[in-house]
Amino acid sequence: MNAKDNMDNQTQQSFDAVSRIVAAYAGRSDTSQDDILALTQRLMPVFAGLPVALPATAEIAQPTAVATPAIAIEKAVTDDKVYCLCCGRGFTMLKRHLKAEHGLTEDEYRTMFGLAEDFPLVAPKYSERKAAYAKKVGLGKYSRDAEGEGATAP
C-alpha cells in the first residue's frame, strides 16, 4: 500500500468516526441543526489531525431548556390530568406517552423543559386514589420480625 492509499484510508476513517459521533448526537431530542453543524465543524479538524484552536473556556456546554412548551407550565398539572408539554395532550400518567410518542425518559423530559425533579408526571387525584387503595388492602404493612421467625436457618 502506498502513501496515498494510506492517507485516503485514514481520511475515510476520520470521516466515519465524525459521522458516528454526529449521528449519535443528532439522535437527541434537544438538538438543533445549528448544534449539529457546530459539532461537525469542531470535530473535523480533530479527527483530521489538524491543530484545533479551543475557545478560552473549553468546557462543554450542558444542554439547556431549548424546547418551548405546547402549553404553559403552570397549566400542565390539574387534579385529573397531567398535560404533555411536547404536544399538549392530557393523560393520567405521562411516562408511557413520553417514551412511545416522543422517545423521552422522565429525566430527559424534565431537563428539556427545565422542570424540577419533583414535578409530577402523574395526575394528583390518580396518585391519591392508588395510595388509598394500597393502604386499604394493607400493602406495605408487614412485620419483618414475624417473617424471620418462621424461616429456618440453612
Image (tube, rainbow, N blue to C red):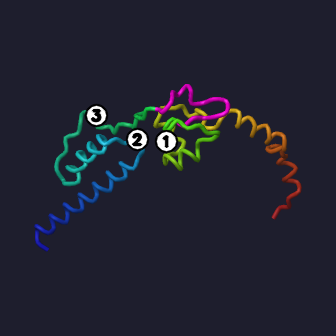
* Magenta stretch, residue numbers: 69-84
The mark closer to the camera, 1 or 3, is 1
Instruction: Tell me where residue 12 sits by quadrant.
Output: bottom left
Question: Horizontally, is 41 left or right of 78 in the view?
Answer: left
CA separation, marks 1 and 3?
26 Å
Q: CA separation, marks 2 and 1? A: 9 Å
Of pointers 2 and 1, the one earlier in the residue sequence: 2
Q: Dot 1, how many residues are within 10 Å of its Cα: few (below 14), some (14-19), or many (20+)?
A: some
Q: Which residue is mark 1?
A: 108
Callout 2, which amino acid? Asp
Name the kind of residue labelled 3 in the image.
Thr
Disc nearer the start of the sequence (1/3): 3
Other-residue count near label 2 (Cα within 10 Å), few / some / many at <14 / 14–19 / ≥20: some
For disc 2, the marked residue is: 30
Callout 1: SS: helix
Q: Position of residue 126 (x, y in %)?
A: 70, 37
Of 43 and 75, the residue lying toward us: 75
